[in-house]
Amino acid sequence: MIRFSKVGYILATAGSAIGLGAIWKFPYMTGQNGGMAFVFVFTLAFLLFGISVFIVEIFFGRASRQNAISTFASLAPKNMGFLKFGGWMIFSGVLIFSFYVVVLGWLLHYLFLVIAGGLPKSLEAAEVLWVEFIGGEIPYQLLWHFVIVALCAYILSKGVKKGIERLNFILMPLLLLIFIGLLGYSMFQDSFKQSFEFLFTPDFSKLNAKVIVEAIGQAFFSLSLGVGVILTYSNSIPKEGNFIRYTIIIALLNFIFCLIAGLVVFTFIFGYGAEPSSGPGLVFISLPLIFANMGVSGDIIAFLFFVALIFAGITSAVSMLEPFNAYLMEAFHWSRKKTNFFSIGISYVLGVFALFSNTALMSEALSFFDKNLFGWFDYITSSFMLPLAGVFMCIYMGWILKKDKVYAMSGGYLKGIYFQSWYFTIRFIAPIGIIVAMINLI
Ligand code: TRP
């Protein structure tokens, strides 16, 4: 079990939450789902379901001080041992890791383009570069993917995770600072208004079950919920310290990252007349354009930006496998080395398939229905596995455990009206909201 100090806990959870979810995934999901309607549902889901389930995971982790599977087994009332199967949610972490590191590999490629001075300067060039890279540059993609996986393996096995998280303490504010700068720069572009309207002008005509389900999924993804990451990290949460307050601060910070990323990306997407719904490549097409047109200072900012973003992503990536690893180590008494080798090995292989599914060479063989493997990993985990794990945890805590037991689990940090509202949310609003949205999708 990992032991955290107060600061260590905050750094690890913030490191896990803030990553590509806000900066890569949020803009492209918003673009694909028509803008404002998606942002609206995302905001509600994030603040209401997200923060509530975050607290549920913390309470579970604090109460059991065990891995996710054992947690659900050990807290279950008599004859309800089947509840331990909820712990299978730890596997979504392996699936998410497998495609997440592929995206980190793309970012690494773009970092090298910055260094080599090869960032495109026009929309056409940016699109061609992206399409040719993702569809054809298999050796490069494999190389960068491997480098990222090896880096994650190194971080996990050498126990330098703490060091990386401390580094994040410098790099995350740097990323935020660059983002605020980019936001300021965007505000002076003509297309900023269009971007703002796309994200915030009320227009519920685009609202449908798909938008709602994907927005809820995005909230879970962005807060690292539904895999047991927060649960596992909360195993060793220090007794003192107002972790509810940290949770809210981390969530709000993450939320700010999402909104700024959306505003900046769409300013340039609209400014250059690009397609907002272009999918996972959206950020890879728009960001280079921003930097390339800033001149020399653009190169420096681009360099710092990609470095900071890659680090933010790595601290998220290394968190995803933690629940699975914690289970393997506790249940089978495996060493950390063996465990890492196993979990990283599986996700590396899955990741290679996800990577190939984007290439012209293999996309047909690795596509099923309307999505390729990469798309399916992303879609199934965010939109279904994570929110359903959230529903499971809400029902478990809200209906199966007794209220006074739950109150005791809160350690006195959630009281009075706050406790009552949270309890009502996890008993009714979150599970019903998520299930109803999913049923409507069918
Ligand atoms: N929240 C991270 C991001 O936004 C991704 C992430 C890390 C994650 N750990 C997770 C997502 C566990 C789901 C579950 O980039």
Image (tube, rainbow, N blue to C red):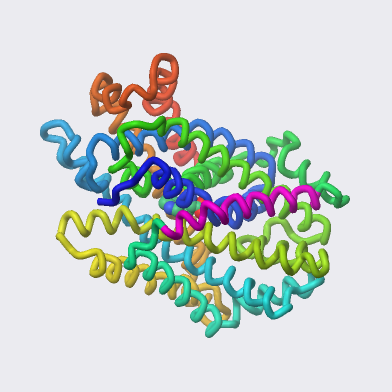
The correct choice, above or below, for 9 with respect to 148 in the image is above
- What residue is at 54 percent from the left and 78 percent from the top? 141
x, y percentage for residue 298? 77, 65
x, y percentage for residue 182? 74, 53
- Principal SS element in the magenta part? helix
- What residue is at 49 percent from the left and 80 percent from the top? 142
The answer to whether residue 273 is left or right of residue 401 is: right
Residue located farthest toward the top when viewing the structure as drawn: 416
Residue located farthest toward the bottom when viewing the structure as drawn: 139
- What residue is at 64 percent from the left and 72 percent from the top? 110
The correct choice, above or below, for 307 with respect to 203 in the image is below
All told, the count of numbered labels is 0
Q: Start and end of the magenta stretch?
A: 163-186
The answer to whether residue 201 is left or right of residue 226 is: right
The correct choice, above or below, for 9 with respect to 164 in the image is above
For the question of whether residue 382 can be seen, the reply is no
Query: Can you tell which quarter of the image residue 412 is in?
Result: top left
x, y percentage for residue 355? 49, 73
The correct choice, above or below, for 138 with respect to 183 in the image is below
x, y percentage for residue 38? 62, 42
